[in-house]
Image (spheres, helix red, strand yellow):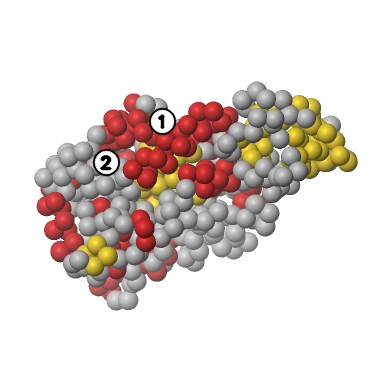
């Protein structure tokens, strides 16, 4: 191994209560909300198909013109308690909120920049209202924070000159100040999810990323930090030059998931995926017809897929400029919530089962209970189950209480029969297993 000053500061999974809570939460929601919601993907009567929160880049809008949008920020339908109720009913255990996206507009009244909610017609501290409302219903709050800041004159994507270097050090101090401000104003925050850290300027300042992790963990004992913040002494990101995960969980799965057969290595560490409902829209886009929009069952399948491989899933919502959610997102939240009400036992606190993946769906596991989450019931009426050596199935029944037949077809192979009254949506069979050891 190479000597590192700014590599992983821990080997293996964190096992403290705060990390266990992060892991057991399993299902979260992302909120991407900022000035970008106002134009919603359209600029000077031209609609851009790219991600709406990147419109400033796609339309090459000068920073001062973009920040003029602040004059229109006045979400009259915004009601933090309603947002919290929607999240609670969806069954999410935590919500990740964009405190500041790449545009540099802050949802909290930061004293380190003028580009905040305080200087808009709305005036009020949106982030503070959301933290209070989500916490009040028992939902943890995580902060998304973009290090990349298009509004700040000292931001540099690369350091080419002495002037760049001096400016960028000022920028890192500015960022430290904003992070300390967030940790001080909102001490119930449980996690920082860093983004906008891919540029050379950050990769060559790995020391700073290690400093941020240590600073936040000193200020907020137990807080979790995503791997995307981190670069090591040589600019290696997420995993250091010795292949060790930095931060507390891998956060590279954005709009994609590890393969349930080829990528089983991810089960060795904690990880969290995040996903959009359209192909690639995090912020509000006026026109969702421009790309494929996942139906509720496809969203559910991704949630279960993540948990089946020992990961968390965060489903994204991009609120409208008026502070309400679009009907499609409300429908998805409602579907997931109704399903979770009946089946959350196979999600919360569950992990990778270690059983061979089958075509009918996914396994999750909690102690000696293995859950079969069935998305593709076979015409044979029999679900093939292959158990690891020494493990036998004792009982099998659906979470709604229907008995199913378990027939051993050969050593460590079983047929589990589909329930007589086939549910019209993905359903769960709970197996009690016995380990020979
Ligand atoms: C690229 C990029 C960003 N990462 C996602 C989580 C969104 O914030 C998107 O804008």
The residue lying at 74 percent from left, 39 percent from top is 381
Direction top: furthest residue: 401
Q: Can the viewer see residue 356 in this picture? A: yes
Question: Could you tell whether 405 is left or right of 345 in the image?
Answer: right
Distance between mark 2 and mark 1 Cα atoms: 16 Å
The residue lying at 88 percent from left, 41 percent from top is 410
Vertical order, 165 against 323 (above or below): below
Q: Position of residue 51 (x, y in %)?
A: 35, 60
Q: Residue 315: which numbered mark, if any?
A: none
The answer to which of 83 and 241 lies nearer the viewer is 83
Find disc 2 in the rendering and name its residue: 324
Q: How many residues crowd around disc 1 within 10 Å: few (fewer than 14), some, or many (20 or more)?
A: some
Vertical order, 69 against 315 (above or below): below
Q: Where is residue 338 in the image (x, y as percent from the top left)?
A: 47, 31
Find disc 1 in the rendering and name its residue: 89
Q: Position of residue 249 (x, y in %)?
A: 52, 47
Direction right: furthest residue: 410
The residue lying at 37 percent from left, 37 percent from top is 141
Q: Can the viewer see residue 155 in this picture? A: no
Quadrant in which residue 81 is drawn? top left
| Label whose residue precedes the other's in the sequence (2 or 1) | 1
Direction bottom: furthest residue: 161
Say if disc 2 is inside 8 Å of ligand 1. no
Q: Quadrant of the N terminus?
A: bottom right
Quadrant in which residue 368 is drawn? top right
């Amino acid at each position: 191994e190479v000597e590192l000053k700014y590599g992983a500061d821990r080997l293996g999974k964190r096992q403290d209560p705060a990390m266990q809570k992060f892991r057991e939460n399993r299902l979260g929601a992302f909120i991407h909300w900022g000035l970008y919601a106002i134009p919603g993907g359209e600029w000077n009567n031209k609609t851009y198909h790219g991600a709406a929160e990147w419109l400033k880049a796609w339309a090459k809008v000068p920073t001062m013109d973009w920040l003029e949008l602040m004059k229109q920020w006045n979400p009259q339908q915004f009601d933090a308690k309603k947002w919290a109720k929607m999240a609670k009913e969806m069954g999410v255990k935590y919500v990740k909120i964009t405190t500041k996206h790449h545009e540099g507009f802050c949802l909290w009244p930061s004293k380190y920049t003028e580009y905040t909610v305080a200087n808009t017609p709305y005036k009020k501290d949106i982030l503070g209202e959301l933290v209070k409302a989500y916490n009040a219903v028992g939902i943890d709050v995580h902060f998304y924070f973009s290090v990349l800041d298009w509004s700040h004159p000292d931001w540099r994507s690369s350091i080419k000159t002495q002037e760049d270097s001096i400016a960028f050090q000022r920028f890192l101090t500015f960022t430290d100040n904003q992070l300390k401000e967030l940790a001080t104003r909102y001490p119930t925050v449980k996690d920082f999810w860093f983004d906008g850290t891919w540029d050379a300027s950050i990769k060559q300042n790995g020391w700073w990323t290690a400093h941020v992790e240590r600073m936040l963990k000193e200020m907020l004992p137990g807080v979790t930090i995503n791997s995307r913040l981190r670069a090591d002494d040589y600019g290696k990101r997420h995993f250091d030059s010795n292949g060790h995960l930095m931060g507390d969980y891998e956060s590279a799965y954005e709009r994609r998931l590890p393969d349930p057969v080829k990528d089983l290595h991810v089960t060795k560490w904690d990880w969290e995926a995040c996903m959009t409902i359209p192909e690639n829209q995090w912020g509000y886009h006026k026109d969702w017809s421009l790309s494929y929009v996942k139906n509720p069952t496809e969203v559910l399948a991704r949630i279960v897929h993540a948990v089946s491989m020992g990961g968390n899933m965060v489903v994204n919502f991009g609120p409208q400029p008026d502070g309400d959610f679009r009907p499609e997102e409300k429908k998805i939240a409602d579907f997931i919530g109704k399903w979770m009400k009946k089946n959350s036992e196979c999600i919360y606190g569950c992990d990778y089962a270690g059983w061979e993946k089958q075509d009918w769906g996914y396994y999750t596991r909690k102690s000696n209970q293995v859950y079969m989450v069935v998305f593709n019931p076979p015409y044979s009426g029999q679900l093939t189950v292959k158990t690891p050596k020494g493990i036998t199935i004792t009982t099998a029944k659906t979470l709604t209480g229907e008995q199913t037949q378990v027939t051993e077809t050969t050593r460590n192979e079983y047929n589990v029969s589909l329930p007589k009254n086939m549910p019209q949506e993905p359903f769960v069979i709970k197996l009690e297993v016995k380990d020979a050891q």
